[in-house]
Amino acid sequence: MNDEELGKLLEKMAYFYCSIPVAAVRQMIPDQYPEVTPEQLDAVLKRCQEEPGWLPCCAVSVSLTEEPELTTRRTIKDEYFYKKFLAERSDGAYAPLPPEYFFEKGAEFYDIPEVHSIRDFAENDLGLHGQKVADFTLQCVICIKYALCLKDSWLSMFYNMTMFTSGFLFSNMEQLKRLQELGRALYQNLPNPVLCGHRPKDLENPPALPDDIPHSLETTQRLVGKMKTANINNLDEVVRAGDKIMKWTASKTGTFKRDGYKIGRNDPCPCGSGKKYKKCCGK
């Protein structure tokens, strides 16, 4: 394995674990790849730390930890997320990289039946096609993968991402509840970075997936259903109507609380591209 191939492996590990101590990397790689010598690994890790442009998606950071961590550049830049992740990450041995996981072109993929089920749902039940199916599936995976860290309903995060970035709208609550069921099955079989890469179903007492449907989201979905019935399908019209409801709610209660963490225009895009939100999904 040459240095470039080893660099790609480190990039893959950074995305799989979100952030992993370099000490654990030094232990895991020689065990799984005997051809990699400790000297070669140290040299590549040093290059990764000293040459920020060598690997575009990952880096070695010591900014928020006493020991160096191999992590994604997106994670390093988003200090709010990074701190929450480190606070929630469990202790223990790290699971090895599964063969069904692969990383390419700045995005990660899980070739498991539960991911295919969500892809089929998007295509057959929601009527999406082509790249929209891939985007829908990837956003589901991202929201479920990091829900434990953010301690927020993954459905709420997903709904906000898809509605206000791609203009996707569910037709009825039944579709949303079906996605909730599929998400629970995926969560059990999806390696989780907060759990050091282990699948929840392989642990004795795994934490529950935050997947409640907030009242505000249910209200919004019912509003969307009424708008679709009235043939109001333009996203701008939906957003304007939603703004009116928010202002009316604030006038009655004195405040309006958003479900979940608001993505800023200059924040790293949640899709994992490494670009700013405003230059990626937030266009």
Image: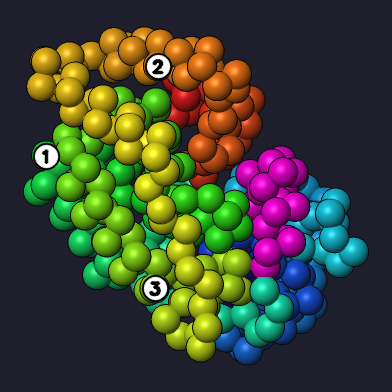
Where residue 18 appears, as percent x and y from the top left, is: 61, 59
Element under disc 3: helix
Residue wearing tag 2: 245
Spot the residue most to the front: 252
Q: How far apart are marks 3 and 2 (CA)?
A: 36 Å
Element under disc 1: loop
Spot the residue most to the right: 66
Residue at image position (74%, 61%) is 87
Q: Distance between the residues labelled 3 and 1?
A: 26 Å
Nearer-N-terminus badge (3/1): 1
Residue at image position (47%, 50%) is 153
Residue at image position (22%, 36%) is 170
From the viewer's perspective, is the residue at label 3 or at label 2 nearer?
2
Q: Is residue 246 above or below residue 159?
A: above
Mark 1 is on which residue type?
A: Gly
Q: Which mark is residue 127?
A: 1
Q: Which residue is nearer to you in this view: 116 or 210?
A: 210
Element under disc 2: helix
Q: In which quarter of the image is residue 65?
A: bottom right
Q: Does the magenta stretch include residue 241?
A: no
Nearer-N-terminus badge (1/2): 1
Q: Is residue 73 magenta?
A: yes
Residue wearing tag 3: 188
Mark 2 is on which residue type?
A: Ile
* In this picture, residue 69 sits left or right of residue 259: right
Mark 3 is on which residue type?
A: Gln
First to last magenta residue range: 71-89
